Amino acid sequence: MESCIPILPPARALLSNNIHHHQNNIIMKSLPILIVPAVASLALFSCENPADQTTTAQTAESAPAAEATGTRYVIASGSKVGFTGSKVTGSHDGGFNTVTGFFTVGEGDSVSGGTIDIDMTSVFSDDEKLTDHLKSGDFFKIDEFPQSKFTVTAVSKSESGYQVSGNLLMRGVEKNISFPATASKDGETITVKAEFDINRKEWGIVYGGMADDLIRDEVIIRFDLTAKPEA
């Protein structure tokens, strides 16, 4: 978990505006005594939003799956779908251990379609208590929605790799998202990677957290997937 550093109020805020000039020396000597209790009572905590460093996925209504042709590559064991969520005082990393599905690879080793199936019961995080909470109705509600799926609807070349669009089905809500991704081939192995953020509330995850430590709407999603030709 990433923690945040307290931001202290300026020392001048501790001084009265009515203090005469000739008293400044005395007060400056007293500042250490004044600041210590002030820090305890007035320190404000601020944490940068990790999603400010990633691309926000464009969201639209669900679309038909891509009509892809080519060789089917099956997603291999060890592939990961990860996430980072944050709140006012810090952030948490997590993901899903069980990810299956396939990619369709056409001419020029370009990915043209596929699906990613996510076993929501395999969720993990950097905090055991949080992991249990993520399984509840406040978040993924896995007793009712044990599976999520991403279905590719379009792929186009970009300067940095690909722009991928697909339907993300989670908690019974399906929306189309578009984000940048990379794909590379090493021998018979295709590797697909992506990092972007979504607004969790669009998929019905609206739990706000504690009143003094609110959870941000943006969640970073990471794909780190490898696939090999179907046997």
Image (spheres, helix red, strand yellow):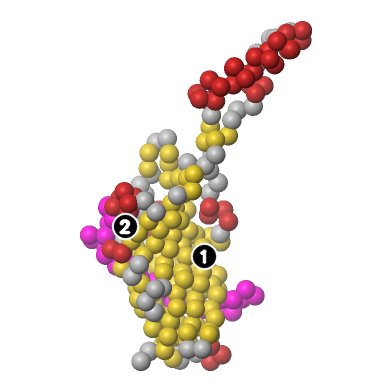
Tell me the element at label 2.
loop
Q: Which amino acid does label 1 sit on?
A: Glu
Residue that lies at the very extreme toward the left in this rendered image? 143
Up the image or down, 205 lies above or below 3; here it is below
Dot 1 surroundings within 10 Å: few (below 14), some, or many (20 or more)? many
Residue 17 visible? The answer is no
Q: Give the range drawn in magenta.
A: 135-162
Spatial separation of the CA atoms under disc 1 and disc 2: 20 Å
Residue 42 versus residue 111: which sits nearer the camera?
42
Is 20 left, or right, of 175 in this rendering? right
Instruction: Please name the residue that numbered disc 1 is placed on.
Output: 195
Residue drawn 35% across the image and 59% down it: 124
Quick check: can you spot residue 166? yes
Instruction: Please provide percent x and percent y for residue 31.
Output: 64, 18
Residue 78: give x, y in percent of width and height: 39, 73
Which residue is found at the position 26% from the left and 60% from the top?
142
Amino acid type for the residue under numbered disc 2: Phe
Q: Where is residue 187 in the image (x, y as percent from the top left)?
A: 51, 89
In this rendering, the answer to whether 1 lies above or below 197 is: above
- Give percent across and percent down for residue 146: 26, 65
Q: In this view, does 182 lie to the left or right of 86?
A: right
Is residue 140 one of those drawn in magenta?
yes
As drawn, the label of residue 140 is 2
Question: Is 13 above or below relative to 46?
Answer: above
Q: Which of 54 and 151 is in front in this view?
A: 54
Residue that appears at 41% across and 73% down: 79
